Image (cartoon, rainbow, N blue to C red):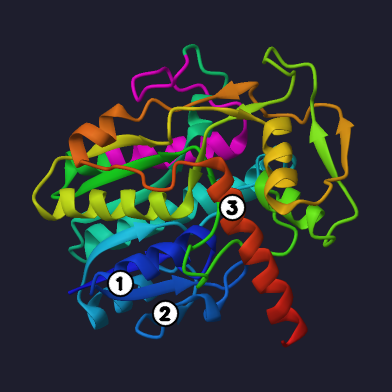
Amino acid sequence: MSVLVTGGAGYIGSHMVHELADRGHDVVVLDNLTTGFKWALPPTATLVVGDIGDEDLVASVVARHGVSAIIHFAGSIVVPESVADPLGYYLNNTVKSRSLIAAAVKNGVKQFIFSSTAAVYGMAREMPVRETTPVEPMSPYGSSKLMTEIMLRDTSLAHDFRYVALRYFNVAGADPKGRTGQSTKGATHLIKVACETALGKRAGMEVFGTDYDTPDGTCLRDYIHVTDLARAHVAALEHLEKGGKSEIFNCGYGKGYSVLEVIEAVRRVSGKPVNAKLSPRRPGDPAAIVAASDKIRGALGWQPVHDNLDEIVGNALAWEAHLARRNAGV
């Protein structure tokens, strides 16, 4: 039996594939390589290039590889882009997820882990945010993910099908072993952008909004190391394999850092200046969002091991240096 990882050649997905491979799982990756890279995968993983919305293709992959569980990462993730192109996001994140879920049900895959997001909470009414906090997404991105959560809930009630939805907070860093990291050109993740700026890959960067109701006026976020996040998926998979019920879990550390604090951490760890321009707010950005993660810690026994902003930044910087060497052919 094997695990199907959609979007497995992308940033978070490739970390997941390495984590599964390290633990001896048979892994098959379905990715259209729009933002993913074949070289980011371990040699033991099988790559199928294709679209998650192709139900016939998914059915053939499930049958050919004896897939027993699906971990679903494939999708679009940029909040401002979703505001400008809502229909594109509803197609890629919601409609195609519906096709993937349908293919899973039709072909007997009973375990499903979904890459959701803290964006489903919008401007949260409480802090830290709990899984019981009302969901009020502020962007089509958040809404597209929430719609998929609803489909999973309803599907699990109608079929022999169980799922875990993991609501990520801000994912950052790179594989400590240097095997993969955030490699997408033009990526908008704050820590990646700040690292690229420090290393001279960008002339400068922008800080969007300085008048929020936060200690320094910039947005406050909960940053989780991508390796800790991959291990949360492993814990979720083990939960389902043991017959655990469908669940939703937050994935974060329970502490927040402002945009300016992150930039200062990049300056401190890199020893280089970061040219940051102060700009107006972006649509769809809440002022602050920090996770309450006691549920996943208690229910799944998940314990982070990279809960340190300087370590996260250090791994991200090391990956950027690796990418520079790779792209230069060194």
Q: Nearer the viewer, residue 195 or 252?
A: 195
Residue 44 shown left or right of residue 78 in the figure: left
Give the labeled residue for mark 2.
42
Residue 15 shown left or right of residue 155 in the figure: right
Q: Quadrant of the N terminus?
A: bottom left
Position of residue 244 relative to residue 215, above or below, is below
Residue 5 percent across, percent down from the top left: 37, 66
Disc nearer the start of the sequence (3/1)? 1
Give the labeled residue for mark 1.
22
Helix or strand or loop: what does disc 1 sit on?
helix
Q: Residue 309, labelled with which disc?
A: none
Foreground mark, 2 or 1, reads 1
Residue 299 percent across, percent down from the top left: 19, 35
- The residue at 25%/43% (across/down) is 155
Question: For residue 22, what is the image quadrant?
Answer: bottom left
Disc nearer the start of the sequence (2/1)? 1
- What separation in Å lies between label 2 and label 1 (alpha carbons)? 9 Å
Position of residue 309 relative to residue 14, above or below, is above
- What separation in Å lies between label 3 and label 2 (alpha carbons)? 23 Å
User: Does the image show residue 102?
Assistant: yes
Q: Quadrant of the C terminus?
A: bottom right
Foreground mark, 3 or 1, reads 1
The amino acid type of the residue labelled 3 equals Ser
Q: Nearer the viewer, residue 272 or 113?
A: 272
Helix or strand or loop: what does disc 3 sit on?
loop
Q: Which residues are magenta?
A: 127-153
The amino acid type of the residue labelled 2 equals Pro
Position of residue 274 relative to residue 138, above or below, is below
Magenta stretch encompasses residue 133: yes
- The residue at 48%/48% (across/down) is 225
Neighbor class of circle 3 (other Cα within 10 Å; few <14, some 14-19, many 20+) is some
Give the labeled residue for mark 3.
76
